[in-house]
Structure formats: C-alpha cells, structure tokens
Image (spheres, grey):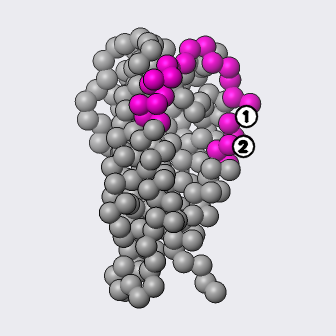
Amino acid sequence: MRPTPRALITGLWLSWAVYWWIAARGVKRNQWRESTLSRMVHGLPLVAAFLLLSPTNSPSLTGASAAARICAWIGMTATAAGLGFAVWARRHIGRNWSGVITVKEDHELVTSGPYSLVRHPIYSGLLLAFAGSALASMHWRGAAALALATMAIMLRVRGEEVVMRGRFGEDYLRYAARVAPLVPFLRGRRPRPGRPRVL
C-alpha cells in the first residue's frame, strides 16, 4: 500500500525530531541564557502548534477531491523542503547552535551557507514545514498551527536579534544590512544596536 502524504509528513517530522535530539549533544557551553519566562513565551505556542498538527487531529483524505489530494502532496513536498533546509542550517552552524536563546562560549557569527541566504534559516525552514503541513491537513487546525508557529518564531527571532546585536555589534549590523531575516531578499526593518539581556 502506497503511503499517504500525511503519513509521509508524520515520518518527516519524527525523523527531524530524532535528528534534532541527537544533534543537540556536543554543543558549546552557554555563557548567557534567556530566562525561563522568555522560553515559555515562544516555546508554548510552538508546542501548541505541533499538537494541532498531530496525526490524530488530521481528517482523512478518503473520498477527498483531486484538488485536495494535490494540495496534500504539495504540502508534503513543502514540509520536506522546509525540514531539509532547517537540517542543513543546523549542521552548518555546528556547535554554536542552541535550543534556547543563548550566548555561547567562543560564540561565532556564522554567515555562510544557508546563513548567507537568511539570518535565521532554521526558522525559515520550520515555517515552510509548518505551512506545508498546514496545507496538507486541509483543516482549520492546520491554519491555527501555522499562525501559532509564526507567532512563536517571530518572538524567537526578535529575541535572538537583540542578543546577536549585543554579542557581535557592528559586524552583526553589517550582516543584517545585506541578509534578510527569514525570507531571502525581504529585509524589512534593519536592527538597531543592543546588548544581551534577559528578555
């Protein structure tokens, strides 16, 4: 029996989660870390988004129209592309990565590879994956999950920008002037100087 798009999406997210857990080992030690409250502010909406996209909350495609099936396959492809991009960024940033907003010991400003396309490629990839999964779900829960994920990621980006500006100063401002935060070539407002702080 050929796997359905939603079954493939579930497998993609599970594979991504396993890789993320394994890759979290061996990162640099923290020099500064955001507060627990800050982690909850952007972490809880992201958890809620994952729960809304869980397989048990997805309606069946049995009897669905051809258009719905096409959307499901497009969504699966977008999910795969987004998670693949996030994994590429995670591998490229190496030991500088952290699951929370931190300043690492000997923290390096990585601007090559996927970081030459966008400043936050992991989040760009996750947003694309959420959008693809939401499209494939063909349900209001998918739209709600995407909205929550977008809110959580934007809060996370805002916090990381403050920390990176404080850690790298003018180097980060020059980097931000030429590279968009999440969507290539869509720069938006340029960040102002700042310093690490508890958000």
For label 1, the SS is loop
x, y percent for residue 172? 43, 21
Tell me if residue 94 is in the magenta stretch: no
Q: Residues within 10 Å of mark 1 (few under 14, many from 20)?
A: few
Residue 45 drawn above or below residue 67: above
Regarding mark 2 in the picture, which secondary structure is present there? Answer: helix
Please, is residue 186 above or below residue 15 in the view? above
The one of 15 and 177 positioned closer to us in this rendering: 15
Question: What quarter of the picture does the N terminus occupy?
Answer: bottom right
Quadrant (top left, top right, bottom left, bottom right) of the C terminus: top left
Q: Amino acid at mark 2?
A: Ile
Q: Residue at x 33, y 28 (%)?
A: 177
Q: Decide if residue 56 is on the left or right side of residue 170.
A: right
- The answer to which image quadrant residue 71 occupies is bottom left
Foreground: 82 or 173? 82
Q: Position of residue 168 (x, y in %)?
A: 47, 16
What residue span does the magenta drawing correspond to? 19-43
**Residue at left 40%, top 79%?**
70
Q: In this view of the protein, can residue 128 be seen by the observer?
A: no
Going 51% across and 74% down the picture, which residue do you hit?
5
CB-based contact (under 8 Å), mark 1 and mark 2: yes
Q: Residue furthest front?
A: 56
Q: Is residue 22 above or below residue 155?
A: below
Residue at image coords 41%, 25%: 159
Q: Mark 2 highlights which residue?
A: 22
In-image side of 172 versus 91 (left or right) = left
x, y percentage for residue 108? 58, 22
Looking at the image, which is closer to me, 141 or 9? 141
Badge 1 amino acid: Arg
* Residue where numbered disc 1 is placed: 25
Residue 75 falls in image quadrant: bottom left
